[in-house]
């Protein structure tokens, strides 16, 4: 068994809860009412995604080579 690590992005939703995407796995999206639940759901979604790739004999991507940074921009506020 091999351990793979994936970055996830949680977005707080206006109506409550958190949407989670896994950038390295296109289309891998899930949701949780709390941060803890969202992370747990992400783990399940990633495992299912990878299992499907293996069954389909597709390569399993990873994000080991991903560089993550934040870019700041200035904008003029408008009404």
Image (cartoon, rainbow, N blue to C red):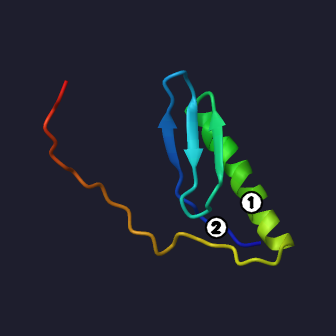
The residue that mark 1 highlights is: 49
State the residue at coordinates (61%, 61%): 26
Relative vertical location of residue 22 with respect to residue 41 in this rendering, above or below: below
Disc ID at residue 16: none
Q: Quadrant of the N terminus?
A: bottom right
Which residue ends up furthest to the right in the rendered image?
55
Sort mark 2 into few (<14), some (14-19) or many (20+) by Cα contacts within 10 Å: few
Mark 1 lies on a secondary structure that is: helix
Residue 75 locus on image (x, y percent): 16, 42
State the residue at coordinates (38%, 62%): 68
Mark 2 lies on a secondary structure that is: loop
Instruction: Determine the image quadrant of residue 53.
Output: bottom right
Inter-mark Cα distance, 1 to 2 = 13 Å
Which residue ends up furthest to the front in the rendered image?
79
Residue 34 locus on image (x, y percent): 59, 29
Q: Quadrant of the C terminus?
A: top left
The residue that mark 2 highlights is: 4
Lower position in the chain sequence, tag 1 or tag 2: 2
Q: Viewed as shown, does residue 73 lie left or right of 12?
A: left
Residue 32 locus on image (x, y percent): 64, 33
Q: Nearer the viewer, residue 78 or 28?
A: 78
Q: Nearer the viewer, residue 14 or 76?
A: 76
Relative vertical location of residue 41 with respect to residue 65 in this rendering, above or below: above
Q: Viewed as shown, does residue 63 lie left or right of 44?
A: left
């Amino acid at each position: 068994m091999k351990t793979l690590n994936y970055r996830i992005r949680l977005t707080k939703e206006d109506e409550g809860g958190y949407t989670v995407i896994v950038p390295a796995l296109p289309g891998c999206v899930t949701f949780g009412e709390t941060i803890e639940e969202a992370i747990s759901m992400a783990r399940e979604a990633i495992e299912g995604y990878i299992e499907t790739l293996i069954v389909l004999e597709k390569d399993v991507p990873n994000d080991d080579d991903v560089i993550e940074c934040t870019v700041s921009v200035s904008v003029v506020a408008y009404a």
